[in-house]
Image: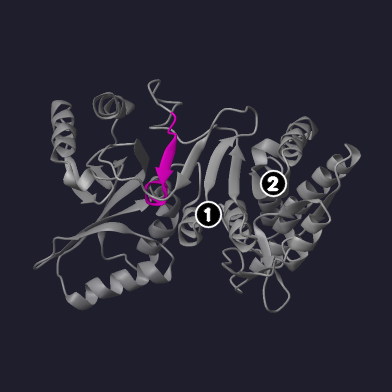
Amino acid sequence: METIVLKFGGSSLADNMKLNIVANKIIDFHNQNNRVVVIVSAQGKTTDNLIKEAKELSYTPDNREMDVLLSTGEQISISKLSILLNRLGYPAISLTGWQAGILTDKNNQEAKIQIINAKRIQEELEKDKIVIIAGFQGINELGDITTLGRGGSDTTAVAVAAAIKADHCYIFSDVDGVYSTDPNKITEAKKLEQLSYTEMLDLSDEGAKVLHNRCVEMAKKYKVLIETGSTFNNNVGTIIQEKMEESTVKSIVKNDDLFLVTLKYETYTNDMFQNLLMLLSEKGIPFHTLINNSINALNISFTIKSLYLPALQQLLDKDLKMFNSSFTNISRISLVGYGIMNNKEILQKVLKILNMNNIELLTIQIDECKLSIITKEKTSNTIIEQLHHELIQ
């Protein structure tokens, strides 16, 4: 008998009809002589709606109280699913994050799991029950409810799988696996049979939305076998496990949610430069690809996600008024696959296609399994289509 973890996202649980689909999928796994633990997200847009309602009460709601509020979404999901499974004749029990023994640090809204005391989970499995656990939440040493931030239910699933030494961790959503590029934009996109942890982590970091990077990092650390698949069909998904030695491009991701920020001032000192970086850090504005062109005058550029533009603009209006600033929407194109660093033909083909399309480059970065290019302007999906056709067999 194998122990497996099944995780279902919010779109899979959005209404009672979909809850029945999820219940039948769980029953199928249970009937195959598996011990089943299920991790669930909040239904549909529940979390977004709770955030909206809280901000109607306060522009800056307290983080602790927000965790108390947001944790209720997953509690609704676990209770409904357990009610349904019990009615169908399959004994099930719902557990909140703290009932399941998920202990976190004290960082509300972005808590990290420190340990899972899986005693209660194991006891319920020994009674042949299907255990339904609320994802995205835990409890800290003060006894306060905490939430894990974006992708928290995926992280919960992998953490629980590691704690109970599960044989398999399935992550179900409304897509049936990881693709060679965005299938909604490129018709030639192909579903990938396997990816290594590192390849999947690179894809997550570059904006692929199948799995969150924290969940992949944890899976890599504890060697948890993940399979992504669709809630709504039985197609074979994508398996994420240890790396395979090969030299090929597996997937191409284009991220248009980036801005190149340029800051200039008539004089330059190292203190001024260091103070600027300190201010960005203090205000929680993460920046990447920083280029310091300064000698006598300050001239630096860096990239940020569009999410942080309002905070940066506020900082420029208040504390950094002396700088002349400009913002340009750009693209970051990333090719992921082991062996890229040692395969010069890949880079040559990429540069040829970019040159044919008169694409100006800002930076190129190559490591073991990723080639990333930042362009000086936002690029069209045609580039991805050409790269995909040329590089992915």
The residue shown at (56%, 64%) is: 110
Q: Position of residue 386 (x, y in %)?
A: 26, 24
Q: Point out the image quarter for the C terminus.
A: top left
- Please, what is the three-letter code of the amino acid marked with disc 2? Asn
Identify the mark nearer the N-term, 1 or 2. Answer: 2
Kind of residue sitting beneath label 1: Val
In this view of the protein, which residue sits in the foreground, 27 or 95?
27
Which residue position is annotated with label 1?
A: 224
Q: Secondary structure at mark 2?
A: helix
In the foreground, 50 or 233: 233
| Towards the viewer: 30 or 351 | 30
At x 61%, y 68%, the residue is 108
Residue in the image at 13% along x and 64% along y: 294
The magenta span reads: 191-201
Q: Is residue 3 depicted above or below 105 in this figure?
A: above
Residue hosting label 2: 49
Q: Residue 193 lies in magenta, yes or no?
A: yes
Image side of residue 310 versus residue 4, left or right: left
Where residue 137 sits: x, y (%)?
67, 61
Q: Which is more foreground, mark 1 or mark 2?
A: 1
In percent of width and height, residue 365 lies at: 21, 50
Dot 1 lies on which element? loop
